[in-house]
Image (tube, grey):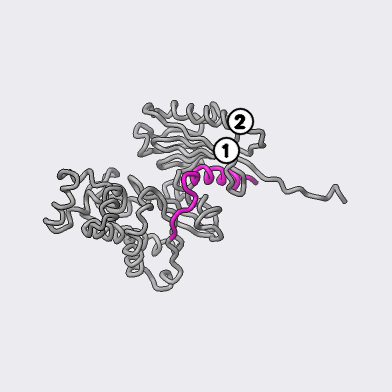
Amino acid sequence: MAEFEVTMKSLYAIGVDLGGTNLRVGVIRDDGHVEADAAVPVGTEKSADRIASLIGEHVALMQNQTSLPLTGCGCGIPGIVDSDRGIVFNSPNFPDWQDVPILKLLEKSITLPLLIDNDANMFALAELLFGAGKGRHNLIMLTLGSGIGGGIVIDGKVFHGDRGFAGEVGHIVVEPDGVPCGCKSHGCWEQYAAGRAFTHLVHRLPKHEREAVLAEVYGDANQLSPELIASLAGRGNTIAKELWRSYGRYLGIGIASLINVLGITTIVIGGGIARSWDYFIDACRAEIMSRTYHKNVVQLKLLPASLGENTGIVGAASAMFQRRP
């Protein structure tokens, strides 16, 4: 009967997470375990040809350092990505990229089967399979940093929409006559619930409170970073705590809209701003509860992302595992 026995062998893939500052590459097992990983600076020269060459170089190094059989390589890239056609339409971290055929550029130096996708989609897949969303079928992943990245998973699969444009949640409009956004609209969510939020929120304070906060940065509202406001709140500053409540309210407004449209009630929140979770989450939850159906509120799960710095490479490799027949 030995000829009928089947040995279940693990699968392995390389995951690539491209950021504006660093590139991470790792060998990932199909249970999410990181077998090996490395991080290198992206540098200042950010042309598509040079970045593709950098990725290819470090994928090759990772291949040479492992004897494990590799099924392919998945790459997470910031920006609007058409994963089917292998094109990056544009990327906030690489402003010169416009309709770049990045998959073809990568294929010049990478011999493994390849796929690309938006980095937030990769984060969402990783958290669904191995992180905070494990065991669920549907999930919205938000990454709170200089902008708001979004990944949507429906029935266990990343939802891309038409040509990869799904998940641009940072450009939900929460203030129709609000501050201008780089996308050419006004009042976008990420102006009020991402890294630049406090620059705008401070102007809503009474004059004496506004001046007290601005004194911390010599009157320059552009220096009011989440880290600074968190530091002030940590020292008991009541104005800073109120700013975080305003931030949480705007975060909740956007999340409530997503829940009402998609009917997904598992929300995983990552990114640097998530480190200040305790300052904003109560106001965020209260706002969601006031703006969504009760039955959705009962099911609501607001969860901090749990995979840390490996989220991107785990998700990118997992996308390759999912693509296998």
Give the labeled residue for mark 1: 36
**Measured from the top left, where is residue 160 in percent x and y?**
47, 49
Q: Residues within 10 Å of mark 1 (few under 14, many from 20)?
A: some
Q: Residue furthest front?
A: 235
What residue sits 65% from the left and 46% below the top?
Answer: 325
State the SS at label 1: strand
Please provide the residue range marked out in magenta.
303-325
**Measured from the top left, where is residue 280 in percent x and y?**
32, 59
Which secondary structure is most common in the magenta stretch?
helix
What residue sits 40% from the left and 63% below the top?
Answer: 259
Quarter of the image for residue 246 reads bottom left
Q: Is residue 290 above or below residue 73?
A: below
Q: Amino acid at mark 1?
A: Ala
Q: Residue 169 vs residue 185: left or right?
A: right
Q: Is residue 102 above or below residue 308?
A: above
**Measured from the top left, where is residue 293 in percent x and y?**
39, 71
N-terminal of the two: label 1 or label 2?
1
What residue sits 48% from the left and 37% below the top?
Answer: 24
Q: Amino acid at mark 2?
A: Gln
315 within the magenta span: yes
Give the labeled residue for mark 2: 65
State the SS at label 2: loop
| Residues at marks 1 and 2 touching, judged by CB atoms closer than 8 Å | yes
How much space separates mark 1 and mark 2, taking CA atoms? 9 Å
What residue sits 60% from the left and 30% below the top?
Answer: 111
Q: Residues within 10 Å of mark 2 (few under 14, many from 20)?
A: few
Question: Which of the pair 258/29 is nearer the observer?
Answer: 29
**Measured from the top left, where is residue 166 in percent x and y?**
42, 50
Q: Residue 92 vs residue 70: left or right?
A: left
Q: How many marks?
A: 2
184 within the magenta span: no
